[in-house]
Amino acid sequence: MRKPIIAGNWKMNKTPEEAKALVTELIPLVKDAECDVVVCTPAVCFAAVAPVIEGTNVKLGAQNVHFKASGAYTGELSAEMLKAAGCEYVIIGHSERRQYFGETDKTVNLRTVAAVNAGLKAIVCVGENKEEREAGYTDYLVAYQTLMALHGLTNEQIVETIIAYEPVWAIGTGLTATDEQANETIGVIRKAIAGKYGECVAEKVRIQYGGSMKGSNVKGLMAQPEIDGGLIGGASLKAADFAQVVNF
Ligand code: PGA
């Protein structure tokens, strides 16, 4: 029932010229995709990418958003700015932002509410690190991160929001959670949403897996009943690799 969504997270890669070349190559490769297709590019690439993807099934996303509409927030971008630049989606609370840029569950929540209220689709990232998994805290942590991020949204807004479960130990490491591990933890996230907002809401929320997802493992992950897509880092930087994931 839930339409899968595959999103590329380019992180800090690609100049505008390289971005344009990548999406130009990607568009024909993914035109028959049965899932939603998103590329989350660096903000400096929006102007190069937006006109190229116009009218195609490839949608544009950002990698962060500020929670204020405007003001003295050097280096930040507002939801309205992202929308004006052609973005429909925005990644919020990626583990790299939590790890290196002081992102907290509180700021993730503020950013999520601001993005969703402005009409952007938020891709909210949650996930445990290696120590937390080994200590047995994964389920508590992902449930907490998810509910904190969604706090203040209406049920209608929550069903439009995407959660990306990304175990930190699997990001960029080549280590993937097993299909069953990913499915199980995503099930925990869905149960947490059901506990607070009801089954009807939880059943509609799309929850992606992310962490070294690529052409060679996408089929197994996507065959799991709880997994509704992927957030793809390394394998989204080449059109052919990303297309292989999209056309799982
Ligand atoms: P990866 O990154 O696919 O390179 O592991 C995923 C992510 O960080 O979103």
Image (cartoon, rainbow, N blue to C red):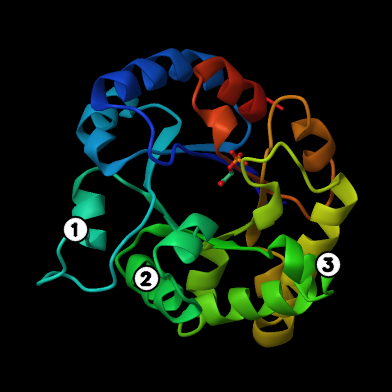
Q: Nearer the viewer, residue 33 or 85?
A: 85
Label 2 crowding class (10 Å Cα cut-off): few <14, some 14-19, many 20+?
Answer: many
- Reading the image, the residue beneath label 1 is 75
Q: Which residue is mark 2?
A: 111
Asked which secondary structure carries label 3, the reply is helix
Q: Residues within 10 Å of mark 3 (few under 14, many from 20)?
A: few
Against 100, residue 222 (above or below) is: above
Percent x, y of residue 10: 44, 37
- Check disc 3 and give the amino acid type: Glu
User: Spatial distance from mark 2 to mark 3, Cα to Cα?
Assistant: 30 Å
- Residue drawn at 61 percent across, 36 percent down: 35
Task: Give the residue drawn at x 45%, y 85%.
Answer: 152
Q: Quadrant of the C terminus?
A: top right
Q: Which residue is mark 3?
A: 134
Residue closer to the observer: 23 or 12: 12
Give the number of the mark in front: 3 or 1.
3
Side of 39 where 15 appears, left or right = left
Residue 14 appearing in the image: yes
Q: Secondary structure at mark 2?
A: helix
